[in-house]
Image (cartoon, rainbow, N blue to C red):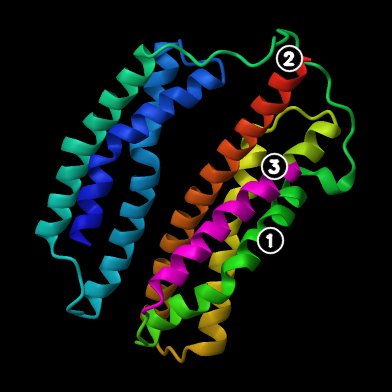
Amino acid sequence: MTALIILFVLMGVVAGYFCTRVLKIMGVGEQWDVVKRTTFFTALFFPGVIFIITLFLNFFLIAVKSSSAIPFGTIVAIAALWSGISIPLCFIGSYYGWKKPAPVPFSQLSMISKPIPPQPWYMHPLISILMGGVLPFGAVFIELYFILSSIWLQKYYYLFGFLFIVFVILVVTCSEITIVMCYFQLCSEDYNWWWRSFGTGAATGLYTFLYSIFYLVTKLQIEGVVSIILYVGYSLTMSLCVGVVTGMIGFFSSYYFIRGIYQAIHLE
């Protein structure tokens, strides 16, 4: 856990750099005010959500006098690492990303937004996102069962090579389904692909959370409101992490797909 926290803090420079690079990809990376605001949001949002959930669960652990409660000194140390190292590193990475030239546009963009025609019901953002998240989750839910069993039922887990293969399958599946959904969206003349592609990948985290609740109901015999709250809180944290990772995979897969097809059109 200590190594994970330190690694996350040091990766703030990478988060800031890619935050600014994505802004430049979207054409707003030259506006320093937008860069500062987005970098601040990047440095605070996801760690802040995890921090709030952890504090909320820690109150219940303290209330039941659990030995696993996080001491106040540890919380202060983590907050100091976050505010004193992670956030400055995020802005340092953002600055270097801002100074680097923007990627070469892969097509000539029109300054006038084209009207988007009425979309069929199955291309509604919510429906397409939920449909897109089913396949990546279906590729890993069996492995998720063994992971949850090792965490909550104290069973040994030693198939780490197989776990890596399943992770590769998740990456490939998430990329493919996001590209397919993005292609259908472009065929319907809806060019707002960026948040849709992120949501399609991030829906895997939603199904992970729902499966965690299903696992609680069917496999675990947890008694007490506090124990259930702790389980739901830890499952929510894990699902948020999965959603952010798969959403990132979906966004960059769609970006490189669109870049590839429009470069091919430009060459022809």
* Lower sequence index among marks 2 and 1: 1
Find numbered disc 2 in the image and state the secondary structure of the residue it sits on: helix
* Residue 36, percent from left and from top: 37, 20
Dot label at residue 267: 2
- For this orientation, the residue located farthest to the front is 268
Quadrant in the picture for residue 235:
bottom left
Relative height, residue 190 to residue 6 (above, below): above
Q: Decide whether residue 171 is among the magenta residues.
A: yes
Find numbered disc 1 in the image and state the secondary structure of the residue it sits on: helix
Marks 2 and 1, how far apart at CA = 34 Å
Relative height, residue 104 to residue 224 (above, below): above
Crowd band around label 2 with a 10 angstrom C-alpha radius: few (<14), some (14–19), many (20+): few
Give the residues drawn in magenta, as a range: 158-181
The number of numbered discs placed on residues in the rendered structure image is 3
**Quadrant where the C terminus lies?**
top right
**Quadrant where the N terminus lies?**
bottom left
* Residue 137, percent from left and from top: 61, 64
For disc 1, the marked residue is 135
Find numbered disc 3 in the image and state the secondary structure of the residue it sits on: helix
Determine whether, in the image, residue 55 is placed left or right of residue 198.
left
Crowd band around label 3 with a 10 angstrom C-alpha radius: few (<14), some (14–19), many (20+): many
At label 3, the amino acid type is Ile
Marks 1 and 3, how far apart at CA = 13 Å
Marks 2 and 3, how far apart at CA = 21 Å
Tell whether label 3 touches label 2 (CB within 8 Å).
no
Q: Residue at x 41, y 76 (%)?
A: 159
Q: Decide whether residue 49 is among the magenta residues.
A: no
For disc 3, the marked residue is 179
- Main secondary structure type of the part rendered in magenta: helix
At label 1, the amino acid type is Leu
